[in-house]
Image: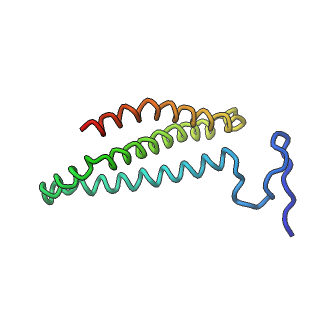
Amino acid sequence: MKAPPIETPKRGLRAPAGTLYRGTEGMWSWVLHRITGTAIYFFLLVHILDTALIRVSPEAYNAVISAYQTEIMGLGEVALVGAIVFHAFNGLRIILIDFWGWATQHHRLMFWIVVGLWVVTMLAFTPRHLINVFSH
């Protein structure tokens, strides 16, 4: 037997109790925080490995670094900065929610503030970075 839908005063009917996906801002925040965290982790792993190449072979290190100075990697850097910025802003949001009770009541608003700050930051960073990438 399925659980009855949960009635909430602001949102009306939501997904039945017991399902994992709710589709609200809190769920999207949770998913995006994990995706960006995982992406940053793998970037750092690759970065440590390619930097360690200098001790093994300076020629191999130079070859890897020259491969990084392409337009595709420049676009990848935009994605990396986007992941870092979202993860940082959302991490501050999570800290506020954990330590202050008022933040829990306003977590949806805070998610949209994080998205707005992310958009503003990326609009400031992306054109400037891509001008440098494509001007060489």
- Quadrant where the C terminus is found in the figure: top left
> At which x and y percent is residue 38?
46, 55
Task: Name the one closer to the observer, 54 or 112.
Answer: 112
Task: Name the one closer to the observer, 104 or 39.
Answer: 39
- In the displayed image of the protein, which residue is found farthest to the bottom? 1
Q: Residue at x 33, y 34 (%)?
A: 131
Task: Name the one closer to the observer, 55 or 115.
Answer: 115
Q: How is the image coloured?
A: rainbow
> At which x and y percent is residue 17?
80, 58
Q: Residue at x 30, y 39 (%)?
A: 134
Q: Is residue 112 above or below residue 12?
A: above
Residue 114 located left or right of residue 49: right
> At which x and y percent is residue 14?
80, 51
Q: How many marks overall?
A: 0
- Quadrant where the N terminus is found in the figure: bottom right
Residue 111 located left or right of residue 72: right
Q: Quadrant of residue 92?
A: top right
Q: Residue at x 70, y 47 (%)?
A: 24
Q: Is residue 7 above or below residue 21?
A: above
> At which x and y percent is residue 110?
63, 34
